[in-house]
Amino acid sequence: MTDNHRTSNPSTDQQQALVSIYWDYQNIPNAKQANNLLLFANSLGYVVNRKVYDNWQQGNKDSQKRTFVNLGFECVNVPHSIKNAADFSLSIDCYGEATSSLYPHLFIVLSGDGYCEILIPKLQNKGKKVIILARQGNERKSLKKLADKFYFVDELLNSI
């Protein structure tokens, strides 16, 4: 895939931001919000990556997984053999993408966990913008200050 997406405007031709979505489903288990999230992300730029992390083989998550797959999400299976395994996997993938892309890039991370306190500055040091979406009452307060933008997922996505 090439990263040379552009918008056409009669007066200017400027590069459109590339948007990547990284969703920690353990923290925000609401597949019904996936379509609204895509509408939000598409309003910000060209969505090039969408991943959702969970232990998809645990419990009965077939309908949720099907919702994500139908919307073009990659469902990354993370067995819970170690604590915070989904957090680690998400962070490694997200930072890996940020490191390999030289283009303007916006990362939307759905989580409220403390691991984002480490991830956000690493992405920003690579020149990337970070939007955090978290569940109200389940977020680290420091994320509001660290992220370029912070929203509560239900407030933002229900208003679209």
Image (cartoon, rainbow, N blue to C red):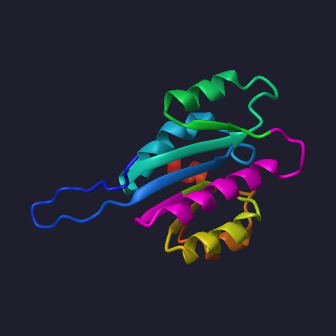
Q: Position of residue 15 (x, y in %)?
A: 29, 63
Image height check: is 138 above or below 117? above
What residue lies at 63% left-to-right and 48% top-to-bottom? Answer: 23
As drawn, is 67 to the left or to the right of 8?
right
Image height check: is 106 above or below 60? below
Residue 71 visible = yes
Q: Position of residue 125 (x, y in %)?
A: 57, 77
What residue lies at 18% left-to-right and 56% top-to-bottom? Answer: 8
Q: Position of residue 147 (x, y in %)?
A: 59, 71
What residue lies at 53% left-to-right and 59% top-to-bottom? Answer: 107
- Circle count: 0
As drawn, is 132 to the left or to the right of 111?
left
89 or 71: nearer the eye? 89
- Extreme residue toward the left, this view: 10
Q: Which residues are magenta?
A: 79-107
Residue 159 visible = no
As drawn, is 4 to the left or to the right of 7?
right
138 or 120: nearer the eye? 120
Image height check: is 46 above or below 33? below
21 or 125: nearer the eye? 125
Q: Position of residue 7 (x, y in %)?
A: 23, 56
| Residue 126 placement: quadrant | bottom right
Q: Is residue 95 magenta?
A: yes
Q: Is residue 36 magenta?
A: no
